[in-house]
Image (cartoon, helix red, strand yellow):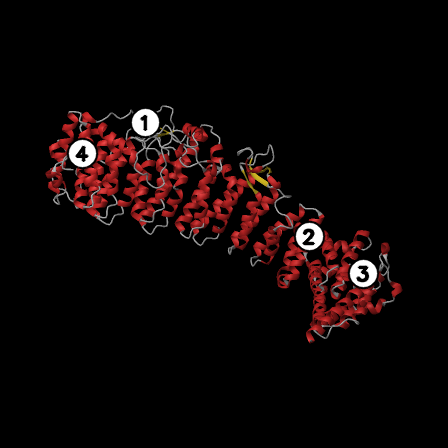
Amino acid sequence: MSEVLGVALSRQLQEKLYDKRKTAALEIERLVREALVVNNTTKVDRIIRAIVGDFAYSTLPNARNGGLIALAAVAIALGVDELALRLDVLVPPILSCFSDPDTRVRYYACESMYNVGKVARRHILRFFNEILDALSRLVADTDPSVKNGAELLDRLVKDIVCEYASYYSQQHLDQQQQFPSAQNTRPPSEPAFPAAPGSLSLLPEMLPTTFNFPRFIPLLSERIKTLNPFTRMYLIQWITTLDSIPYLELVAYLPEFLDGLFNYLSDPNLDVRTAALNLLGEFLKEIHDVVQVQKEQGHDDDAMRRPASTLSLASSFFVDTSKPSKSNATAVLTQSTSTSSIMSSKQSPNTKTLTQYPTKSSTSSAAPPPFQPSSYQNGANVVLDIGKIVFILTPHVSSSDEETQATALRWIHQLLALVQRVMIPFTPELVAAILPCLAHRVTPIRNIAVEANTALFKLVAEFGVVLGYGGAGVLYLGSEGGGVAGSGGGSPGVDVGGGFEVKSAVDALTKQFQDESEETRVASMEWLAMLHKKAPKKVIDSDDVTFQALLRLLSDTSEEVVKKDLQLLAQISMTSDDDYFTRFLLNLLDLFSSNKRLLESRGSLIIRHLCLSLNPERMFRVFAEILEREEDLEFASLMIQTLNIILVTAPELSDLRRRLKNLDSRDGLLLFAVLYRSWCHNPVSTFCLCLLSQAYEHASTLLQTFADLEITVQFLIQVDKLVQLIESPVFTYLRLQLLEPERYPFLYKALYGILMLLPQSSAFATLRNRLNSVGNMVMLYGLAPGSVGAGAQSEPLGLKWSELLMHFRNVQNRHERSRRTGISIDSH
């Protein structure tokens, strides 16, 4: 060291006092200048190696301080061209001092790098990632002077980047595919100092003296995850600066750091939240502008339709060119006018300005001319990876932070308005994110969610078409004519790249059945109904999980959900064959059998709503055929009782009742026979069916068998309800027939039989008063069987009433044995 710098100069460079170190630095600058004059580059290199080895990497803080100021002096003396050749030696020691435990060393490292950057200008961009990585930590330093020094250095770097930023070219994006191994190469021009975490090697055709996104974006993606509010604000400022530079088109790389920006919305620091929200608003506006520009130029949406995995990180090339700074407000500091005054005032870590080393204009290398393409239009060549953006947004819709939720929903809503059909392939992810917010307690969030859901629903409903079937017959829906052909494993000639697998959407909607909000469950029903209309044969099968979930949803606490569920189930049944229809009703009966409370509370509502959409006669025939073979006799009796009340009272079944009254026709008679055989599970319902069908003679015969039945309290309650039904408008015709005793003598016999079964209750008094009101007519005409005119005692069209009565007795005997078996088991 003494041979190169001398003992006195070396000792002076390690002095504690700043003025002495500054004097030594000025002497070193003189030595370097003299060596350059005689072209003695060997001596220059020896001086640099001595400063780096003996001072910059010294274990003594004062020595490191002296080494840093000496390196700045050497940079001033070298000038741009000579300094560019030696940056690989000068910059790494300064970078290492950024993380020094001594506060003063960190401050002087900022000062030294500032002066090196002022001389090197665009050449310092070779170390941009390393400098930015260090500054992102220094801005959060606990020492105010270090933070101040880092901020001033940051201004200089921003100024250099704005001046020498590279032009984004879509052509280079396509050329990248020719260099699959570019990231694994290390050109000789790349700095030997280890790159910052997350940074990539230089790609072909990239010069280290220009700022380019492919090397910067990986570092930003890694640093954006920081939790420190100062570092977060620092990164936001850098993103804002880069976004303001023409030609760079930072929005093309938005997916690489968008997730981090959304995380900033929940930062405890208000300034960070506000800055992040404003920046996201600017990016959303840029996306809008890009889409509009490309639409005006007639560009298609192939790039935006591209799946998220097809666009690689930092896959673009950048042309080595410079352009004027958009703003001159960054990195402008007072400059000295002569070399003798570069350190005329004492500086310390508490000083708010940095020592500046001026450069000579004669040593500055000319910057390349600015690139101003006449054909360039902002946003015209940008590739927006909508896939990545959507996948980033959807998790934030479920964030616990309301601002994050609202912003994510606002982005989704805007994208649905901007790119529309491009959004269709992401329907499964979107519905899973949006639907739970439809009942959000915050009104603005709820309103945005409703608007987004409505927009997506209309989009799929209007433009969604069956694109084809992929592997294993998987159904795809999407926008017609869009997408990447052959993706998704589809059949030859089937284009499914622009669509989504319907099963994925159905599964996502089925999961929403468990949501606690009624609005979400209703919306999921509406979505399933719409998708089923698109492909009725493939969306929902009676054996799949979704169908079973729809059946279970019939027990939902919300009546609106149950109605939507019934509409969907009916819609499925209408487009299915007889086997499916039968399986559906069988599953419905199984649900009622396992959930008696559902049958009692919602059974009538469910069946009546199904009758509105389906053929009531077809439903009741299938119900009757299934219940006739039902092994659970108690459930069969309860179910028949429910069906009978619906049959008698529901306005939706007026046509079915009209057919049952006409036993003179073969269809009416066969319908009566089918219902009768299952109605036998409940005696009172069977009797009511006979009254409804005007089979009064058979009804009076049934009453005689009631004497053999066990008259329980439940039985009497049903008889009481029957009396009330007789007094209802449905049986008006029956009450009018009491005025013709000569034609309907068995009607009187049946009603008097009911009167004899009843205890003397209100129902008994009601029926007795009704019969007494026509008692004089009975006495006038009598009840002689021979006077029957159009009675129902005959057996039209081969219907054997005696066989029906025998079937009734057999069924009731089964019920009696079942009750006795149950009593016997309970007694033991």
Residue at the front extreme of this rendering: 3
Mark 3 crowdedness (10 Å alpha carbons): few <14, some 14-19, many ≥20: many
Residue tagged 2: 583
Residue tagged 1: 321
Element assignment for label 2: helix
Q: Are marks 2 and 3 in contact (CB under 8 Å)?
A: no
Q: Are marks 4 and 1 in contact (CB under 8 Å)?
A: no
- Number of the front mark, 4 or 1: 4
- Classify residue 340 by image quadrant: top left
Q: Earlier in the sequence, mark 2 or mark 4?
A: 4
Residue tagged 3: 695
Viewer-nearest residue: 366 or 547:
366
Q: Are marks 4 and 3 in contact (CB under 8 Å)?
A: no
Mark 2 crowdedness (10 Å alpha carbons): few <14, some 14-19, many ≥20: some
Q: Amino acid at mark 4?
A: Ile
When the figure is inspected, residue 508 is found, relative to residue 375, above or below; the finding is below
x and y percentages locating residue 324 in the rendered image: 28, 29
Q: Which mark is residue 47?
A: 4
